[in-house]
Amino acid sequence: MNKKGFTLIELIIVVIVIGILAAVALPQYLKMVERAKCAKAKQALGLIAQAEKAYRAEYDVYLSVINANLNNTNATGLGAFVELDEVVADTDWDYAVVAANVANAQTFTITATRSNGSKSGNTITLNQIGVWGGTMPKSYGGVNTTVSQN
């Protein structure tokens, strides 16, 4: 009699091998997803910085704004200078700009704060001279030590 099929031992070995591969691959996959989200936040910070510089060229001051008001297209918002629709629609990050326009010291710091996920609460920051910082671990795409982009 000719029997075809797999034995129980063969099936158990296959399940164990798949389990081991999943245990190794899943954390790496989740890390890469988080890195992609950090890259998206860094791009958004760059767009907001570009809008801030354009706003300053027009009005001679930087503007403090939070997520909901970023895309204002009138004189009180940055949306008149750079298209920020995707930044405002981002559900993974909250963005805020703190500007200091005191005497001749005109500065801004843009902060992206992770709003959900395993790394929620971590931040990525960018200031007016292009210095990156924040609390997001570097291995996840963040810059947890100050590094200049210049």
Image (cartoon, helix red, strand yellow):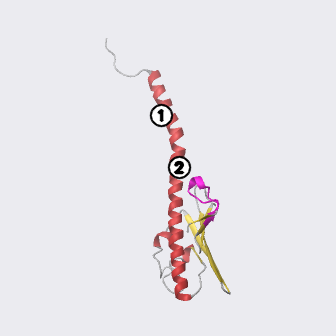
Q: Give the amino acid type for the residue marked by disc 2 in the picture.
A: Leu
User: Residue 73 location in percent, x, y?
Assistant: 48, 82
On the rendered structure, is 101 left or right of 6? right
Dividing the image into 4 quarters, which one contains the N terminus? Answer: top left
Write down the region rendered in magenta.
132-145
Which label sits on residue 30? 2
Q: Locate the C terminus and report the quarter of the image it occupies.
A: bottom right
Q: Is residue 8 left or right of residue 131?
A: left
Measuring from the top left, give residue 65's x and y in whole percent: 59, 78
Q: Position of residue 84 (x, y in %)?
A: 48, 74
* Up-down relation of residue 58 to residue 125 (above or below): below
Q: Residue at x 46, y 29 (%)?
A: 14
Q: Which mark is residue 18?
A: 1
Q: Residues within 10 Å of mark 1 (few under 14, many from 20)?
A: few
Please report whichever mark, 2 or 1, sits nearer to the chain's N-terminal start.
1
**Percent coordinates x, y for residue 90 in the rendering:** 51, 66
* Vertical position of residue 5 compared to residue 108: above or below: above
Asked whether the viewer can see residue 90, the reply is no
